[in-house]
Structures are given as structure tokens and as C-alpha cells.
Amino acid sequence: MTDGQNRSNIKPGCRVLIVQKHHQRSGETTEGTVQDILTKSPNHPHGIKVRLESGEVGRVKTVLE
């Protein structure tokens, strides 16, 4: 498992845990498969923003595979 701060760790099709904007305070994570990478920079301190295949958008906390 790797953290989600580096864009190079994340590819479309990866299984990840994200935190959605409205769950930032609680830290509740959502598991899903990456469809699109929305952050353009090579890294981000709060996690790379992605869209899951389910349509949910959030910042990657953990890359599962």
C-alpha cells in the first residue's frame, strides 16, 4: 500500500481509498477504482484528486494495489 500524494503511484484502473470533500472532517474513506486523475501536478500534500468509476470525486489517501 502506498500513499496517494504522488501522481506516479496512481493509474486509471487502480483500487484506491479516497476521502470526499464532505468527509474531510471525519476522514471517512470510500473504496473504488480510478477512472480519471484530476490533479495535474506530480504531487499534492493532501492527495491526488481522482474520479472513481462510480462517479465519486475525492483525494486519494491510499493506493491498495
Image (cartoon, rainbow, N blue to C red):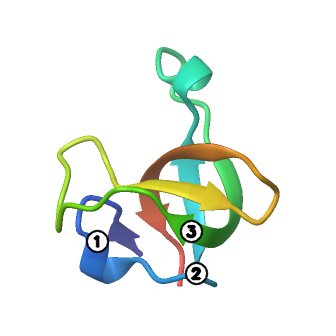
Tell me if label 1 and label 3 are in contact, CB under 8 Å.
no
Q: Quadrant of residue 4?
A: bottom left
Tell me if label 2 and label 1 are in contact, CB under 8 Å.
no
The circle on residue 7 is: 1
Secondary structure under tag 3 reads: strand
Write the residue at 61% across / 41% down: 29
User: Where's residue 58, x and y in %?
Assistant: 54, 43
**In this rendering, which labeled residue sits more in front, label 3 or label 2?**
3
Could you tell which of marks 3 and 2 lies nearer the N-terminus? Answer: 2
User: Where's residue 24, x and y in %?
Assistant: 48, 23
Relative vertical location of residue 4 with respect to residue 27 in this rendering, above or below = below
Write the residue at 17% across / 61% down: 43
Residue denoted by label 2: 14
Q: Distance of mark 2 from mark 1, alpha carbons? A: 12 Å
Q: Distance of mark 3 from mark 2, alpha carbons? A: 10 Å
Residue denoted by label 3: 36
User: Where's residue 25, x and y in %?
Assistant: 47, 14
Mark 3 is on which residue type? Asp
**In this rendering, which labeled residue sits more in front, label 2 or label 1?**
1
Q: Is residue 57 left or right of residue 55?
A: left
Q: Is residue 53 left or right of residue 7?
A: right
Q: Quadrant of residue 14?
A: bottom right
Q: Is residue 31 left or right of residue 46?
A: right
Mark 2 is on which residue type? Cys
Relative vertical location of residue 7 with respect to residue 8 in this rendering, above or below = above
